[in-house]
Image (spheres, rainbow, N blue to C red):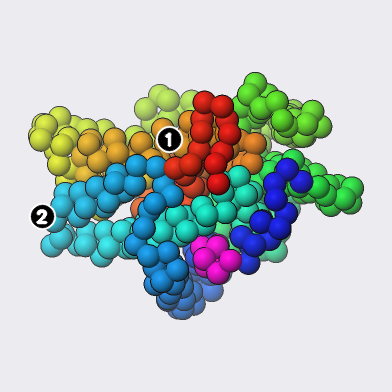
Amino acid sequence: MTNSSAQIKTILIDSIFILLIANMFLVIAGYGVISILGSGFFAAVKGLRIVTLIAGFFWVLHKNGLKFNRLRRSGKFTFFMIVLVVSSAFYFGTDGVLYNLLNLLLGFLYILLSVNYLLRYGLEDLLSSFSIGVFFCFSFVVLAYFAFGGSLTNTNIYGETEDGAFVSNHYGWSASLVALAAVDIIKNFKLNLFTKFLLSSYLIILFFLLIISASRSGLLAVGMTTIFLLFKSNQVKPIVKFLIVGIPLVIFFNLKDVEDSAINFVIEKSQSQLGGKDDGRLESGEIMFEVFNNNPGYYLTGIGMFNTEYLERGNSILGKYHNSYLEILFGAGIIVFGVFLSFMVLRPFRVFWKVAHSSSLLFFPLLIIPFFESDLTPGQFLFFPWFGYMLILNAKDVKLKNRKQLT
């Protein structure tokens, strides 16, 4: 095992870590419950999730205090939260703006404080522990696919699982995260031969589910991680590289000649959207950029977080951005968006590239998939893993020049 076994065990039983993972799981469970049991049961799960979030917030506040001292340039987080409120203040009367903004701020601050507390264990061990948490949480979605009638004989499940526990994108996103978390576990821990065999077999199922889900964001994320492993990481054993590259290729070549397969669907849908057709996200972006170009001041101030007034006026197909990054850009303006990118993209990428890739490979899925996610609140499917992972990569005591980490 490359990391400290005793330290990781300590992280896994730390109440702050357990509550963070519990919040992550309850969001996922909520999506499954509303699909299977309906809105009544969903309300109960949502209530439990809110209680868990609030309890977690006050518990970490008790354990950590209101401190970001283990995070690099912590002042930017305070600036980000304050300006989000200020930029949206004039729109508090608009339906949903104040409620959703408070939800976002509570969730963000909770994760920020939790990450700051957990970084006492060091970057490497915390990332390895985080991969374990993601592995088990999102395996729930993978198992739900088979529990509710999914089969490995399917060649394309896009749009065909709406009456199941989750929709096809959820299966694809979860499969990509669990697959890369499984690779993290294989390469970072000393496992017996049987456990390695089980995880390797599970990888085959995960890659197959990812492909038949036709989730282009999930496929792109795993593809970029594969390229990264091939050209960047010297610490990954050849057998692990072979599994990551070989398994998807075998599945791809088995499906590419099947007429209704997910492979052909992805190609056709991508060609259609590149031609400017059938893309509600692109349409929403075009509507908003036209509004901003006609009112250049909005580039500085934004139009308020969660304010969909202009999309409704423009008769947007989706009615929302369905892009978490654009939610920040259009909601709070370009300055806040730049700050957001600094701690959610730029710094995390640099730390991942130089140091963190040896402990965790979850960067690309958690960078790319939010481009296709709406509802930037703690109820978003990937809210907790996305913010949690990227904020971990903002650890202050990391030396990038010589790739050594201080703890």
Relative placement, left or right, of 187 versus 280 is: right
Relative placement, left or right, of 45 versus 236 is: left
Percent of width and height locating residue 304:
19, 50
State how far apart marks 1 and 2 are (Cα): 32 Å
Q: Which residue is mark 2?
A: 90
Instruction: Name the residue at 38% across, 31% down.
Output: 277
On residue 229, the disc is: none
On residue 347, the disc is: 1
Q: Front-most of 171 and 223? A: 223
Q: Secondary structure at mark 1?
A: helix
Residue type (three-letter) at the residue carrying disc 2: Phe
Percent of width and height locating residue 274:
42, 25
In this picture, is 294 found above or below 17? above
Examine the residues drawn in magenta and state their main secondary structure.
Answer: helix
In this picture, is 29 found above or below 184? below
Q: Quadrant of residue 140?
A: bottom right
Instruction: Name the residue at 35% across, 37% down.
Output: 341
Q: Secondary structure at mark 2?
A: helix
Residues in magenta, as a range: 14-22
